[in-house]
Amino acid sequence: MGALANRDFRRLWLADLVSQLGSRVDVLAVPLLAVTALGASVFEVSLLRTAESLPYLLLGLQVGAWCDRMRHRPALIAADVGRAVLIASIPVAALFGVLGLAHLLVVVFGVGLLGVFFDIAHQTYVPRLVTREQLPDANSRLQTNLSMAAVAGPGLAGVVVQALGNAAALGVDAVSYLGSALWLHRIEAHDVRPEPRPRRLLREIGDGLRVVRGDRILLAISVHGAVSSFFQSVHLAIVIVFLARDVGLSPWAIGLLGTATLTGALTAGLVARRIGERIGGARALCGAAVLYGLAYQLYPFTGPGWALTCYVVAGFFASFGVIVLNVFGMSFQQAVAPPELLGRVNSITHTLVFGAVPLGSLLGGALAGAFGMRVTLHIAAAGVLASAAILLRSPLRKLRDLTAAGS
């Protein structure tokens, strides 16, 4: 029986879908607002992405330990409400003419901080709502949400930004977080608080680290995620500015282009489970890593007119690859980690992946300032492809199925 037959998981899935769609607005609107209304430089735009991802470096490991001590649904709801308030402050400040880059930095840092709690609690909550056998289907459904938002979101965001302006469009994102909180509130499953235990934060974090370090497959997946995330962040820190300034696209066109490229994510979300059944989860992971890296090689050749095809093709195959990586990597992690340590294991892998983002974002801004944006995109592409070697040289290369990887 599929995971969506579970009423409580279905509510979690709907909450995630609403939130994912709304979040696509600020992905486009915040950097464009900084560029158009505040005259921010490429490096200052990269600082916004750095500020949003910095909390993982500062608190990611600690949040994992805290999530193993708390009930998850209240934490998810509180994080959604808090993010709605922070995002809503941007159009309010713009309305009164007091919006500045410092305000944007504070907001994105706060949203990133609450996002750390939400992401780790959310990933830890899923195995408490579905059976172990339903985990691949549940994760595939959630990744399909990400795919649908990735496909519909940029176009929607482009239209909203074009119609309302960058600042006012962020109100849509604030409303989406409130909608997510309402769906989460409707979950009926009893959210049990873990048994109290002595609070030794460093020892608790160390327990999670030993799980990740002790499983060579899990370690390889985590390290690959960190390295590829670092170079992907070099790319993402500048790509919207590149499309707006070097290619000369409008916000609506950038949004439409994003929709066209990310159809690969939607396709992957729909077929990932069947790919795993046909060729095996381990082979799917390795193949997706190579596909992901090869796709990135096309991004730097993007230009006006027919050269936009390079961006579309790259986006399709890159987004397809990353969704397949997420589905099987996440399902394996949730299956092998002891339930009482899952929050800490999730926080460690999240910290490795998202902790690399601020470092990559800063490097992207610095490289673009020194060598230009197109050269920086080539550097990012080479790094993403090279990261595939981490999985290809791991024990995964000898396996067909992840279930055989055990420990």
Image (cartoon, grey):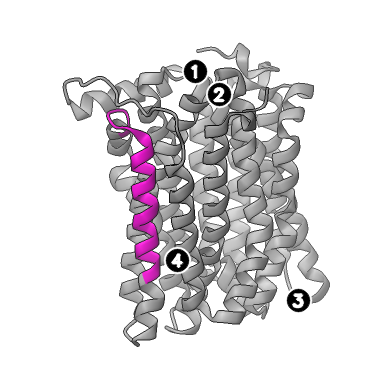
Mark carried by residue 46: 4
Alpha-carbon span between mark 1 and mark 2: 6 Å
| Magenta stretch: includes residue 76 | yes
Q: Is disc 4 in contact with disc 3, using a CB cutoff of under 8 Å?
A: no
Quickly name the residue at label 2.
332
Alpha-carbon span between mark 4 and mark 3: 24 Å
**Vertical arrangement, residue 6 with respect to residue 170, above or below:** above
Alpha-carbon span between mark 3 and mark 2: 42 Å
**Marked residue nearer the N-terminal end (4 or 1):** 4
Mark 4 secondary-structure assignment: helix
Mark 2 secondary-structure assignment: helix
**Marked residue nearer the N-terminal end (4 or 3):** 4
The secondary structure that dominates the magenta segment is helix
Q: Residue at x 44, y 64 (%)?
A: 174
Mark carried by residue 336: 1
Q: Position of residue 126 (x, y in %)?
A: 49, 31
Q: Looking at the rendering, which quadrant does residue 87 occupy?
A: bottom left
Mark carried by residue 190: none
Q: Nearer the viewer, residue 110 or 69?
A: 69
- Report the amino acid beneath label 2: Phe
Quickly name the residue at label 3.
304
